Amino acid sequence: MDVSTTARLHKAEVDAPRNFKLYERAVAAGVISTGNGLIVAPTATGKSYIGRSVIREAVKNHLGGVHAYLVPYRALAQEMYESFKRELQSEGLVAKLKISTGDNWDPVYPEETDILVSTFERFSSILSQADLQVGRVVLDEIHLLADEGRGPNLESLIVRLRTWKRPLSLCALSAVVANPEDLATWLGVPLVRGSHEDRSVQVEFRCEEEMDITGRIKAEVAAAIGDGDQSIVFCNSKASAQKLAGELSQTISRMLPGSDVEALRDAVARFTGAGDAETREEETPLLELLISGVAYHHAGLSKQARLLVENAFRERHLKVICCTPTLAAGVNLPAKLVVVKDVYRTEFVRGYPKKVVLSTGELLNMLGRAGRPGQVDAGHGIALVEPGLLDPANLEKLRLAIREGSGNPVVTKLPESFDAIMRFILQTVSDRGEATMDDIVAVFKASYWFHQEKQEITFDKPLSQDVMEDIPSFKKVTPEIYVEDVWTTPDGVAGIVRSGENAYTFSPISSARTVRVRRDKSTGAGSCVSTWRVLLTPCCFPRKPRRRSETELFMFPLTSSGRPSTRGARLRSLFVC
């Protein structure tokens, strides 16, 4: 990137947000000074800048602990890391800045880290470090609590921060949602709301039905290139993004100026001259497309390849990116046009594919990549709907929601997944080393699930049986961990879990028939020491491609004499940190 481009982006990101109305309201509400708040606003209103300001303020005031800025995606983490570097240098602040994601697996040592930029999942693992003192925490894209895939893990992380390793403060950033007051009440922080009027760049979003979606996209991006603008097209899968990029390449290559072709060739040459041969060979199709002015972008690419695409787009040589929703979360790119090709995701119900329409919030996040402040002077977003996907009433409802920018309510997804509940319980025990049922109940009461449901939590025999009976139906946890055999007992269901060459038995426990067992490491013998519910001990074993940690949950039902059964049961947990 040339010096003038860097300077322009630096000025846009560092100076402009101070004049944003949303930033001024956050300051007035004490969000910057205290570090506590929930910022709910449309895209491109300065939410991320407010979050980074919260952490820079902690550095200015020499507040202790590791201050964490947490995001859902690696691409966004890299962008926040670069923004922090520029802003710290601009303000003359000295801080030890570190990034930790799936792309950056270097160890995180608390004594060597002041600011940590990380993904939700990576930080959840780092949080288990005994010597970690958590400073201020900023949670970006907290509306993903409503995401079926990532929501339960995010909720578990927040509960751990609320009940176990409490941060100095918590600031959450969210796209527009329908129930911000409810979310702020659960977090216990003040609410600051924004609107489209807070955007410094005006955008126009619309939703249209289209028979020939690919043909329409070709026409839209060609028109944008003719006007000197760039485009991002969102697809619902990696395969769809790669296919569309190939279909657009011939149209775009004919319109690409010679200077851009040469610049892209140079970028590809630099890329192929670095890195390992295997990575270069895997990404040959991408490199061939990139020279034509179009590229695809998804989580399956290497970090270097993703940065190649992003930088070529920022330098204005690459005209179109076809991507998955990984670019929908906060990444700043100079796109004037954004098209959502697929307004649905494919889910499998009883083995059959089903098209599920994306939430308004997800669509607005994607469309909001158009017209980023400091990058372009206006933005246009189009969501294309294939005929028959929605009935006329629901199509009109979606059009209205997109036009007005109204989001969906954030609803917990924790109770919808047995896997998530098991991970939640086992994580609680893992954090504490041992836990009673009362401990688990207390943690559940801190969840967003309990906040929304407000139901009494009890662990009686029927519930114990129900949970144990669900384990066999869960069957295969991973290719290496699966339920091999199942049988019934007076207390519920017992069985054998196989992990590689090792087999482990599990058996049910009612709250009245459990003991804590202290196990002698040298002999393996167990002795009863108190009437606790469960005892969890960690174990580590290598797995390709990286080393992971798991836990073993020891459960010992009592015999009729009140002694621990000689047939101890241990279930390798579903939790992977």
Image (cartoon, helix red, strand yellow):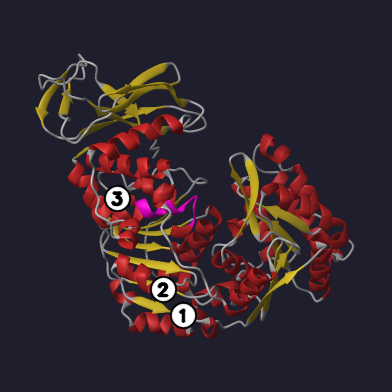
Left or right position of 24 against 507: right
Classify 10 Å Cα crowding around label 1: few (below 14), some (14-19), many (20 and above).
Answer: many
Taking the magenta stretch, the answer to whether it contains residue 43 is no
Q: Position of residue 338 (x, y in %)?
A: 69, 68
Looking at the image, tell me whether mark 3 or mark 1 is earlier in sequence order.
Answer: 3
How far is the residue under mark 3 from the one under mark 1?
37 Å
Type of amino acid under label 1: Gly
Q: Is residue 191 above or below residue 330?
A: below
SS of the residue under disc 1: loop
Place of residue 243 in the rendered image (x, y in percent of width and height, measured from the top left) = 77, 50
- Callout 2, which amino acid? Ile
Q: Which SS does the magenta portion mostly show?
A: helix
Task: Find out whether the residues at labels 2 and 1 contact each other: C-beta distance under 8 Å.
Answer: yes
Q: Which mark is residue 39?
A: 2
Circle nearer the N terminus (2, 1):
2
The numbered dot on residue 387 is none
Residue 111 numbered tag: 3
In the foreground, 432 or 317: 432
Report the span colored magenta: 147-156
Quarter holding residue 115: bottom left
Mark 3 or mark 2, which is nearer the start of the sequence?
A: 2
Calculate the distance from the C-alpha at mark 2 to the C-alpha at mark 1.
8 Å
Badge 1 is on which residue? 194
| Left/right of residue 270 with respect to residue 216 in the rendered view | left
Q: Nearer the viewer, mark 3 or mark 1?
A: 1
Q: Is residue 149 magenta?
A: yes
